[in-house]
Image: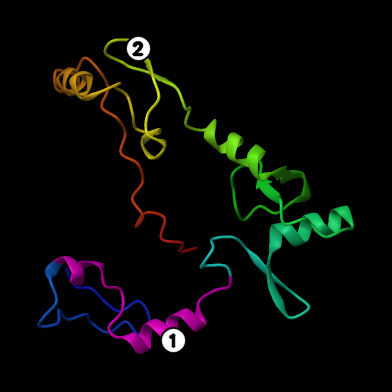
Amino acid sequence: MDRTCRHCEKRLVQKAKEYPSQFSRRLFCDRACVVEWWRSRPVGLKTRYKQAKVNGQKRLAHRVVVERHLGRSLLRSEQVHHINGDRTDNRVENLQILTSGEHSRLHNQKHPILKTCLVCGVEFRPHPTKRQRARACGRKCGNVLNGMVQRGEVEPQPKPPTPSDSSGKN
């Protein structure tokens, strides 16, 4: 597989003291290309939110839209939520002001705090970072569930998108 620098498009060559796993993750040929690419990148690529310049300062566009609609500045404690989940859709009707707690609760509903084990039916509370994929209450039920998947009794869990699928390219 031929890989090229994301900035200058030169062919990437593995360095002498570079492990293959490091080389496979490298995107640029050298530090100068990283700096140049970073300076020339489209606005908003770092945060994946659109940005707007207001009085010479970069600001998150969705906050600017809501502030103009309300006719006042937003408080630091106020967060703007995109109702349809599209971070680039900054129409006033798609934006909602929430407190930090409300915003957190809203996003926790996407992957519920309590789940039901597919093997034994017990309700359990998965680790916060595992809520999306947790389907069994513990190791024993997880082993039973894996056997059920292999025998075709239960649908395998769909693979979540990898970071390379959402690389931010438009």
Between 170 and 155, the one lying in front of the other is: 155
**Is residue 78 left or right of 14 when viewed as pictured?**
right
The quarter of the displayed image where residue 23 is located? bottom left
The quarter of the displayed image where residue 84 is located? top right
Between 61 and 99, the one lying in front of the other is: 99
Instruction: Check disc 2 and report its element: helix, strand or loop.
Output: loop
State how many labels appear: 2
Residue 79: x and y in percent read 69, 50
Identify which amino acid the numbered label 1 is placed on.
Glu
Residue 93: x and y in percent read 77, 44
- What residue is drawn where x is 45% and y is 22%? 114
- Callout 2: 10 Å neighbours few (<14), some, many (20+)? few
Q: Dominant secondary structure of the magenta stretch?
A: helix
- What residue is drawn where x is 34% and y is 32%? 133
- Which residue is farthest bottom? 32
Q: Within the magenta stretch, is there residue 29?
A: yes
- What residue is drawn where x is 36% and y is 36%? 130
**Is residue 72 left or right of 76 when viewed as pictured?**
right
Q: Within the magenta stretch, is there residue 159?
A: no
Instruction: Check disc 1 and report its element: helix, strand or loop.
Output: helix
Residue 122: numbered disc: 2
Between 161 and 11, the one lying in front of the other is: 161
Magenta residues? 21-43
Q: In this picture, is 46 found above or below 107?
A: below
- Which residue is farthest left? 16
The quarter of the displayed image where residue 102 is located? top right
Residue 36: numbered disc: 1
Residue 158: x and y in percent read 31, 34
- Which residue is farthest right? 71
Identify which amino acid the numbered label 2 is placed on.
Val
Residue 152: numbered disc: none
